[in-house]
Image (cartoon, helix red, strand yellow):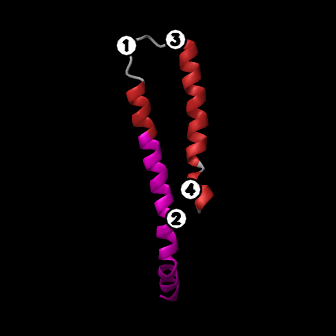
Amino acid sequence: MLNLIKNFENIGEEIENVKWIFLTMLVFLAAGALFRLIGRGEGEVKIKHAMLIAAFSWLLISLISTIPFHYI
């Protein structure tokens, strides 16, 4: 029972950490929506465009994923 009480003492700190995870989720959703709107063209995607999109996506994903680790 004492362990359970000790766990509830740290709940405020845990909630503080969860907000950064949700912020990261919202940034990913916003970036995805933005890229979806930008990518609505009628042109055909070539292999060099696909490679650039993949490379920049990996960089962006890595950058956005560091948000919780930076603030927690």
Circle 3 crowding by C-alpha within 10 Å: few under 14, some 14–19, many from 20: few
Q: Nearer the viewer, mark 1 or mark 2?
A: 1
Q: x%, y% of residue 11?
A: 48, 75
Placement of the C terminus among the 4 image quadrants? bottom right
Which amino acid lies under the numbered mark 1 shown in the image of this protein?
Glu
Q: Residue at x 48, y 62 (%)?
A: 18
Q: Which residue is mark 1?
A: 42
Q: Position of residue 64 (x, y in %)?
A: 55, 45
Label 4, residues with CA under 10 Å away: few <14, some 14-19, many ≥20: some
- The residue under label 3 is 46
Residue 68 disc label: 4
Percent of width and height locating residue 43: 42, 11
Front disc: 3 or 1: 1
Q: Amino acid at mark 2?
A: Asn
User: What amino acid type should be assigned to the residue bearing mark 4?
Assistant: Pro
Disc 2 on helix, strand or loop? helix
- What is the spatial separation of the Cα atoms under label 1 and label 4, in whole angstroms? 37 Å
Classed neighbour count for the residue bearing mark 1: other residues with Cα under 10 Å, few (<14), some (14–19), many (≥20) = few
Query: How far apart, in angstroms, are the residues tagged by discs 3 and 2?
Result: 42 Å
Q: Disc 2 designates what residue?
A: 17
Q: Is residue 66 left or right of residue 5?
A: right
Ranked by sequence position, the earlier of labels 3 and 4 is 3
What element does badge 1 sit on? loop
| Mark 2 in CB contact with mark 4 (< 8 angstroms) | yes
Q: Would you say the magenta stretch is mainly helix, strand or loop?
A: helix
* Three-letter code for the amino acid on which mark 3 is drawn: Lys
Earlier sequence position, callout 1 versus callout 4? 1
Q: Which residues are magenta?
A: 1-30
Magenta segment: does it hold 63?
no
